[in-house]
Amino acid sequence: MNLLGARALAWTMLALCLVYLLLPLAVTLLVSFSPSAVFELPHDRLVLRWYERIGQLDGLADSVVLTLEVAVVATAVSLGLGTLAAIAVVRGRFPGRGAVATFLVSPLMLPGLVIGIAILQWFRFLGLREALPSLLLAHVVVVLPFVVRTLVAGLARFDFALIDAARTLGLSYGQAVRRVMVPVLAPSFITGGLFGFLASVDNYPVSIFLTDVYHRTLPIQLLQWLGESPDPTVAAVSSLIIGLTIVVLVIGDRLVGLNRMAGL
Amino acid sequence: MRSAGWLSLPAGLYCLAFFAVPLALLLFESVSGPQGLTGAYYADFFGSAFAWGVLFRTLWLALTTTLFCLLIAYPAAFALTWTRGWVQSLLVGLLLLPLSLSVIVKAFGWTVLLRGNGLINVTLQALHLTDAPLRLLFTPAGLLIGIVNIFLPFMVLPIFASVGQLDGRLTDAAATLGGRPFYVFRRVIVPLTWPGVLAGMTLVFSLSIAAYVIPTLLMGDAFQTLPTTVATSFLYLQDPHRGAVAGVVLLVLAVLAVLASSALGRRTELS
Amino acid sequence: MSGTAHLRIDGVSKRFRGTTVLDGIALDVAQGEFLSLLGPSGCGKTTLLRILAGLLPPDAGRVVLGGADVTRVAPHRRNVGVVFQNYALFPHLTVAENVAFGLRARGRPADGIPARVSELLSMVQLGHLAGRSSAQLSGGQQQRVAIARALATGPDLLLLDEPLSALDRKLRETMQVELRRLLRQLHVTAIFVTHDQEEALALSDRIAVMHAGRIEQLATPRAIYDRPATPFVMNFVGQATVLHGMMVGGATLRTAYGEVEVEGTLPPGQAAMLAIRPERIAAGMPVEPGRAGVTLPLSARTFLGSRCLLHGTLAGEDRVTVELPASAAEAVGDDVLLTWNVSDGILFPVAQ
């Protein structure tokens, strides 16, 4: 294969990759405007009927509220715990700090399903049966690894000589941390928090076991609707989710830059 | 800051309580019988042909997914490094978008696409590649199409990072030493991007052995994997011991994948 | 210009995004010659090097190596060795594998390769490190591996891009001597890029002083130092005492500190600048025939061990730097008569 052929292959694969990844999203969007209740494509005209029907979906508001509640609390707690842990791992000099870091990040590499079922069994054993506290406690385990991973990377890159410099210029240690370290670390904070938040909102394997009939997070609820009465209203909800996610990513890009968010 | 170590205590204790302990409990559940510790559940599991089928299917799915992801992602990652500025940012954003969405949203899209009258079949027929609609839903082909889609970004991003970090002067040096472009690719670029490839492969493998939603939606109950066994054992069959065994096996596979990956990574570093 | 130049650079130009980086560079290099490209950062020397290596095509001009036009030839088809600034050793290969890379890439017979690698490594005194990973070496060792690697295939031309700039001073001086000896021994034609004028003066057969994409002067180190062709070369290489003024009469320059005799053919009324190298200036001696002199205030001293530099603050763009042996410098006061041979003065016209 010559150079030109290789380059052509690479570009083709990139194009294929992008089309392939966006295909299900595009299809969802198209179906949400479909004139008929059947999931058929292509169609001749676009209607907003299904978006109007969103209000009629049973349990939508509750599941959105629950999902956001859990995600916000889990992210806040994770940012707190995670920042302390990241400082400990990067700045501390104790044996096994590598192991601690690996331990805190390990849920990312382990089967979420197994973690979910294990947590369910543990809560049952403890007698904890309510959905909301279960979800709140479990989702910290979902979010924390994202926060720790991003913050450890960001802190490892941080030049602590900057704090020394600030102190020689007249700031106290606390002031130096606040005015020098926090702004430099803010992107890592935002990235870790953002992806952790999204991980909680999108989470399936842990949520499926801890939700009940009255308390469903959005993904679980979506699955429920898909099973019950799959009409394009579901596609409309999915499309709104896609739209909101795009907005979140754009905000993330403005604040931090997409390349940084991807960890590059 | 020697005392900094204590700062990890809150997070560590939390994860211990709500992550490590539950997993330990699961492990315990897989070996605790009515008369104390027993390996009977493992014996039952590995004694049944059904379980070996499940194991085989899980590994087949994960390995095939990893392979296809690698084939597409490797060239694509290179092309991505040839883009610059806002174009590259936009493309990275397009890769991040599916990662930021729930698997349910994506799975829904695939159920529509893979139908008999779905977009894929419509396009294939319009291009005269097939006469009759291909049956894609509830087939391994359809499953692979759906699952590779979910995990592809996890392969592209680490390889892209690795290629991006490649020092251009190394390829310059190789060229001035007489290396034709393909020789430079084989002897310099491939070895030096191997860490990113390994990271991507490990991630995709670990995630795809645990895939539950996609196989269930696109293949139904006929395709039993370790994750589906775990879920059905606990939720429907009320057989927690079997579920625990399947769960532990799944965990062990994930851990083995990570260990193998770091061993492979270290070995190439020393060579 | 002889027709037997080993390397001929003929009218090479290059533009990047509207800026001219190289402007009609013309240069002949003889076989076995050590030529330095000396200049500040941004003068185009690294760009020229990359063009010679084939990593960059010129917008105009030709590069002829050993009689063959290689202007558009890909780098892997030229026989040009390159030593990069940060060495660019392959981190995934051992020292021996790095050195062998060019031989393997060019398809040399495999059984001859280990012997050749040993030969080169012993030439740079690194035979004992052959199996070591390249990442574990010190800067000086990495640099020697880089040189061995570039020389392995017996290149027609060796390009070195500031190879010693990352080394500390003592090591750099040792490496300079070793490098020169090695290249002379192998009779390799070398082009050496540097911004360090002392390095260029020490190593080169000839120096091309570059500025803003052009060669300001191409000459031997001695000529560059004693007879700089332009004020830029005079300022960039070495130090000087500089007096500005206006020509009066045939051979006199009127400066703010008095009239001085100069050697030159500038017309009266022409604004001009006179430069004298610090070591050519004597302090506290009378003005004799054939010498010029002026009294200048000296306010600071820099002790350099065996010598001492005396400086002063003068009006406008004038400056004074005198170099004396350290012992003699002690006897010199603050306002002293400085004298030099008229022929040592370098005269430049100044645009009005």
Image (tube, grey):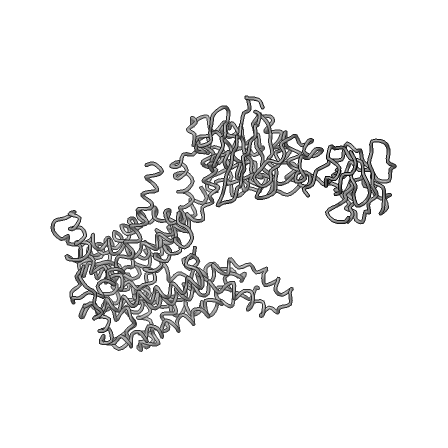
The foreground one among A227 and A236 is A236
Can you say whether C170 is above or below B154 in the image?
above
Residue located at (55% from left, 31% from top): C26
- Give percent across and percent down for residue A236: 24, 68
The foreground one among B107 and C291 is C291
Quadrant for the N terminus of chain B in the image: bottom right
The foreground one among B50 and C348 is C348
Q: Quadrant of residue A63?
A: bottom left
Horizontal side of A161 relative to A32 (left or right) equals right
- Would residue C193 be seen by someone viewing this image from the given angle? yes
Horizontal side of A137 relative to C216 (left or right) equals left
Residue located at (86% from left, 33% from top): C288
Residue located at (43% from left, 40% from top): B188
- Give percent across and percent down for residue B127: 17, 48
- Give percent across and percent down for residue B101: 32, 63
Horizontal side of B1 relative to A127 (left or right) equals right
The foreground one among C114 and C298 is C298
- Give percent across and percent down for residue A143: 39, 66
Can you say whether A110 is above or below C128 in the image?
below
Quadrant for the C terminus of chain B in the image: top left
Q: Quadrant of residue C238?
A: top right
